[in-house]
Amino acid sequence: MGQIYLKTDEEIEILRVSCLLVGKTLAEVAKIIVPGVSPLDLDKVADEFIRDHGAKPGFLGYGGFPNTLCTSVNEQVVHGVPTNRPLESGDIVSVDCGVVLNGFWGDSAFTFEVGEVSKEVKKLLEVTKASLYKGIEAAIAGNRTGDIGAAVQNYAENHGYGVVRELVGHGFGKNLHEGPEVPNFGKSGKGKLLKKGMTIAIEPMINLGGKNVKQLDDGWTIVTTDGKPSAHFEHDIAIRNGKAEILSSFESIEAVLKDKV
Ligand code: MG
Ligand code: MG
């Protein structure tokens, strides 16, 4: 996944601006998520919002990806390509967004409910988001990447869910993917040492059923092999003053969701 670049305090402040723009973009997306809206509609809103704020949609063209957002519906885990197929009540959609501003990336994701979602799926979303914060709590200087993975894995598996192995969190900065790799599973005390100045995207992908996934023929979309729903939440953090400081934010997103109820 590449080299680890430790950031200065100044670089972390520049990164924070990119990370916060992703949260604001996801909040714009949240505003329009209702049954009948298509993932391509979400993509358009995000693309315009990012450009209006002087940033570049980072995912567009990244490795040949065709859109600004990854939109992964229901059994789609991540890297879903937006389509014009309308979302239906009861669906969930994981929206992953990356921007580049002032030469630095932000990369964050949130899974949204569409209309009325079953209790079972609501719980999956709650637990996946909570597992992200468990991982963040473990991201302290002197710990290792395995401590983050173990925290996420233990929490999710205690609820009976499957933890995706094939896709992992990552360092980020001037590049979307830098070292270290940060799996959502692992053993405490194993993996790369976490140090001051590391900036990391932590992003649990948690399945209602088994942990196994496969890629669709489109060359992008990852789906659960058992067809059960999957959730994805991602924050960007910096290791500073011995602990994780969250650079991205769900605050604007959660404010929009509160207003919708
Ligand atoms: Mg992402
Ligand atoms: Mg990421």
Image: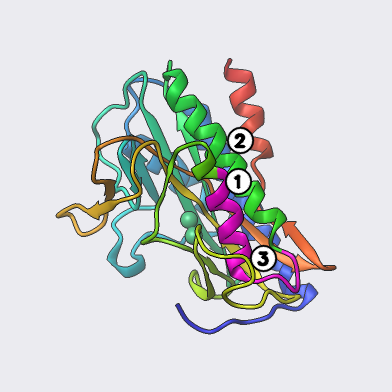
Q: CA distance from mark 1 to mark 3?
A: 13 Å
Asked if residue 109 shows in the view, the reply is yes
103 on left or right of 14 = left
Which residue occupies the foreground of this view, 102 or 242?
242
Q: Residue under circle 1?
A: 23
Q: Amino acid at mark 1?
A: Gly
What element does badge 1 sit on? helix
Q: CA distance from mark 3 to mark 2?
A: 19 Å
Q: CB of mark 1 within 8 Å of CB of mark 2?
A: yes
x%, y% of residue 128?
53, 41
Disc 2 packing (10 Å; few <14; some 14–19; many ≥20): many
Q: Quadrant of the N terminus?
A: bottom left
x%, y% of residue 132?
60, 48
Q: Earlier in the sequence, mark 1 or mark 2?
A: 1
Residue 66 location, quadrant: bottom left
Q: Is residue 249 above or below residue 7?
A: above
Q: Residue under circle 2?
A: 253
Q: Which residues are magenta?
A: 140-155
Q: Is residue 146 magenta?
A: yes
Q: Amino acid at mark 2?
A: Ile
Q: Quadrant of the C terminus?
A: top right
Q: Amino acid at mark 3?
A: Leu
Q: Farthest residue toward the right?
A: 241
The answer as to whether callout 2 falls within 8 Å of ligand 1 is no
x%, y% of residue 178?
52, 76
Q: Earlier in the sequence, mark 3 or mark 2?
A: 3
Residue at horizontal 44 percent and vertical 43 percent from the top: 95
Disc 1 packing (10 Å; few <14; some 14–19; many ≥20): many
What element does badge 2 sit on? helix
Disc on res. 15? 3
